[in-house]
Image (cartoon, rainbow, N blue to C red):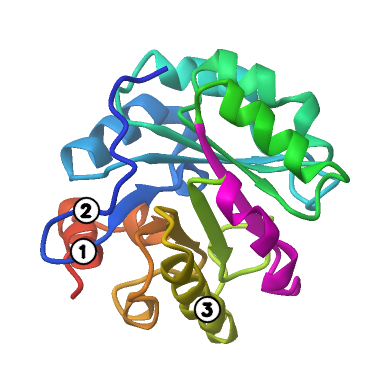
Amino acid sequence: MSENKPWERKAKLGGFLIAPSILSADFARLKEEIDDVTTAGADWIHVDVMDGHFVPNLTIGAPVVKSLRKVTTLPLDCHLMIDNPEKYIPDFLKAGADGITIHVESTPDVAGALQRIRHGGARVGITLRPGTPLEELLPYLEQVDLVLVMTVEPGFGGQSFMPDQVRKVTRLRQEIDARGLRVLIQVDGGITAETVKQVADADCLVAGSAVFGAKNRAAAIAALSRFE
């Protein structure tokens, strides 16, 4: 597991941590792609894990995370879009995941799954589908380090930003501050230099095509991370 764990809010210009999603990378050149966004200023590497059941797409698993761990010192931020994640959390921990985020809808034992991540020493994250009320995850706020707000339907990259999800980000910031917690808010889906203006209460942005699809990736990351 990486020793580099900058989980706290970035203290530069009130900006954001940027986690490029490898879902939009060229998998034939994955190491070079990760090296490139690292040089460009990425803070984390976001890994979308899909099982073809919880979401309709099928992507990568723990073996790829293990390979990624060998080629980057950046934190590996793993978003598990899979059924019964508690069965696979040990595999991702062993592979070198620095952070693991699970869906509140994906298991009947959310608390137990979160505890497995915590006991494994990784950053604990929770998320929900756009159609799931925020109230479904609020009981777990004290157990997590990060809440991911999906601003697209999980399962595929390149989707358009859903502005109706912004209220969840605002409500989360209010709830986290009211409880005096140090929980990061992450936003994933349709993030661009324009849509980022709508999620100013977030701490971390997941960006796929906005980074990997940019001709100048350093400029793209700067444009996102320096928003005030």
19 with respect to 54 (left or right): left
Residue at figure coordinates x 55%, y 65% from the top left: 149
User: Which of the labelled discs sits on residue 174, or is there none?
Assistant: none
User: Which of the labelled discs sits on residue 171, or is there none?
Assistant: 3
In magenta, the rendered stretch is 123-143
Is tag 3's residue or tag 2's residue first in the polypeptide sequence? 2
23 with respect to 102 (left or right): left
Q: Is residue 177 magenta?
A: no
Q: Residues within 10 Å of mark 2 (few under 14, many from 20)?
A: some
User: Which of the labelled discs sits on residue 15, or is there none?
Assistant: 1
Name the quadrant containing residue 203: bottom left
Rendered location of residue 227, percent (x, y): 20, 72
Rendered location of residue 222, percent (x, y): 17, 60
Camera-nearest label, 1 or 3 = 3
Circle 3/circle 2 CB separation < 8 Å: no
Q: Quadrant of the C terminus?
A: bottom left
Rendered location of residue 189, percent (x, y): 52, 65
User: Which of the labelled discs sits on residue 10, or is there none?
Assistant: 2
Rendered location of residue 43, percent (x, y): 28, 43
Helix, strand, or loop for circle 3? helix
Residue at figure coordinates x 59%, y 45% from the top left: 143
Helix, strand, or loop for circle 2? loop
